[in-house]
Image (cartoon, helix red, strand yellow):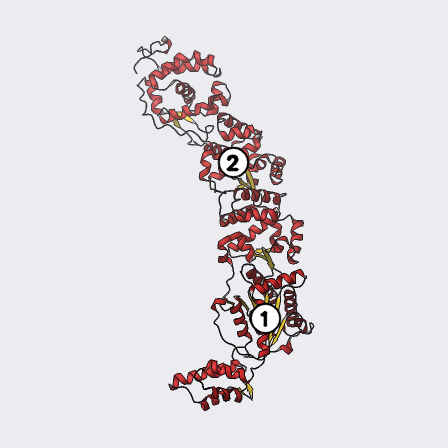
Amino acid sequence: MTNRYTYTPESLLGRDGKVSPINCIHAISKVLKGKGLTNQSINKALDAMKALSQCTGMNGMEALAFVPVFDRDLTETATSITDLANYFNCPVLDVMGYYCFLDDLERQGFLTLENGMAWSPLKRRYRVNPTVLEAIFQGKELKKKPKAEKQKVLDQCDFCSIVSKMVDSRRKEGWDTQELLGNIKQMEDAFQAFEMVKTLREKGLGIEDRVLFYVICDDYTLGIDRETELSDVLNDIFDSPGKRLSVRGSILQLENPLLKEEWVEGVGEGNVKLTNEGVKLFLGDMAKAFIKPTEGLDCYGFASSIKKIYRDADENRPGFSEELKKKMFRLEIANNHLPFVEKLEMDYDDLDRLLFYLVCHECMEDDSFALSDLSCVYPKARAVRESHKFKAEEHPLQKGKLVECSKQGFFDNSVLTLTDNGKRLFFGDDARNFMEKISDRDYYSPEKIEERKLYFSTELQEQIDLLQKSLEESNYAELRKRLEERKMQRGIAVLLYGPSGTGKTESVMQIARATGRAIYHVDISSTKSCWFGESEKLIKGVFKKYEDICEHSEKRPILLFNEADGIFSKRKDSDSSNVAQTENTIQNIILEEIERLDGILIATTNMADNLDSAFERRFLFKIKFEKPVLEARKSIWLSKMPALAEEAAQDLAASFSFSGGEIDNVVRKVTIKEVLGGKEPELQEIKRLCREEKLHGDSARIGFS
């Protein structure tokens, strides 16, 4: 070892006149051991520190940290930060900064780490490297290892990990709560420059709440959205059951400062987790990479975020509804670009909006919201009231035509679903993807209806013409206006009745085509369900669907009940059977709906005598269709068979009192004969086909009606 030090006290030199590491270590120990690390004491040891640095390659502070380890190693005792403080007789806080010098010495090969517990400065235990120890005793030159890459400075994640491990090992180390909190305060003092530590202290949070926050942060590093089991961590921190209950109660009551500052939130039953604000405090600039954006969401992202708020809620926690409202409100503020946010804020209170968003999420997932889950949105007492409102169709979301309530299954398992209006409001242009599509069989647009010439008696034609003119848009609009001014019902209900095949349905088609109105056709069979209560739901759904179509159509369409005798028939004795009761209920619903109708309803029936009298006064137009007279029948024959001679048409019309539908059947069979025989049948053959159309002397009841 070369002596380059310009001034070295003789006491530090060996027999060979060179600096002796043993003498330097002894001199430093003599001055500082048990004397504290004051500036005055360090100055007294400065020459020895410089000399030890010169002969070993350590810097001055590394030399100072090396001495206690060497001294204690002579008795085969490892040294920790706490041992270092005891050696110098000073607070642990005074030597906390020395752990980095010990780590540097370990990387350079001067020291070894005995226990490998590198997760905490308080836990690391160092010994002198045996090779170094032998070289010092023998006076050999110490060869310092190449400087390793500088050790990563502890960051806030490491800090929280250290605190969490200290909490976990409290009992194992034999610490009581105060010792644990005291050790962690020393850790905070050593890392007080961390923004997280500084903020928690400046906000006046007690050490207990700060420690809880550090543990929650450490759990967060194990997985995004990871929750902390509150009971477990409180058991690890506190000896006193009373203290555990006190802190737990402050969290459940939303009175804990961590919740008030919105750094932590309760989730599920007794768990907690970091909020986005908490993540920002914990990770600082790194937080952006881990926080899911809550701004600029589309309706789907918004609904998913609301569902997460709802899923994380604990309905048994006091004030949970207020917490839900607060979280939802922040989400709304961040996404006020969404059209439905402003609309709903003006018309509905906080919890009604929250419920609507949840129903929207269920719709998005092709599901429905159970009425029994209202207690997860409203406080329990209010949930009961809101449930009754839904069943009475008095809830604000129902009155606003956004949500509807319906039964599901055998029991009263009521569910909430979006109306088409609600879907349009929330999903916008995508709403059509969530609506029940009307098949072409049930919905006829006017431009797709083929024009057909119909032949009626003069009196019947006049009635049909009056109805058609009434439904022409300019006349219809004026008619609705006048009826409204006179406080009269604006809806127009029409009954077309008469034998099958007389042109009732085709007349509706031609009126729709001429007036530019679509037809929403009701399949009578679909409104009758074998499930108790389902038929009522289906028939109400028909009218709700019609109302929605009206609201979003340029012209109000025609609601067509074809062959309506099945549901417009005379009411039965309600005591006769459950079926009778259900049918009577359906009829009452229809009567109520016709009474409040703001559109056009046309019903056709072959059996007017079977019509319940209560329906009669509700039809503004009642038009009777009869079999066509002679001249009309002749015109029908000629229109359907243009090649037929006029005399032959007159003969057929006089010989057979057919309806238009029956004539149509005969013409279809004539066409078959033409295809198979290669020529048009003679008149006698056509008459034979006409006779085959008769059953028991009456016209066959087939064909269109």
Picture residue at 45% right of the left edge, 84% below the top: 669
Residue under the image location 40 percent in, 28 percent down:
113
Amino acid marked by disc 2? Val
Relative placement, left or right, of 526 versus 642 is: right
Q: Which amino acid does label 1 sit on?
A: Leu
The image shows residue 417, relative to residue 351, as above or below, that is below
Q: Quadrant of the N terminus?
A: top left
Examine the image and state in which quarter residue 253 appears. Answer: top right
In the displayed structure, 661 sits above or below 525; it is below
Mark closer to the chain start, 1 or 2: 2
Residue 673 is situated, as x and y percent measured from the top left of the image, at 42, 85
Vertical side of 595 occupied by 197: above or below: above
Q: Residues within 10 Å of mark 1 (few under 14, many from 20)?
A: some
Question: Mark 2 falls on what kind of element?
Answer: helix
Q: Please tell me which residue lies in front, 225 or 368.
A: 368
Using the rendered image of the protein, determine whether residue 103 is visible from the camera's viewpoint: yes
The front one of 535 and 224 is 535
**Would you name the residue on which mark 2 appears?**
215
In front of the other: 386 or 11: 386
Residue mark closest to the camera, 1 vs 2:
1
Residue 114, horizontal then vertical, whole percent: 41, 29
For residue 54, side relative to residue 194 (left or right) = left
**Residue at x 62%, y 68% (from the top left corner):** 493
Specify the quadrant of the image occupied by residue 16.
Answer: top left
Q: Is mark 1 on a helix, strand or loop?
A: helix
Q: Quadrant of the C terminus?
A: bottom right
> Which residue is identified by label 1?
467
Q: Residues within 10 Å of mark 2 (few under 14, many from 20)?
A: many
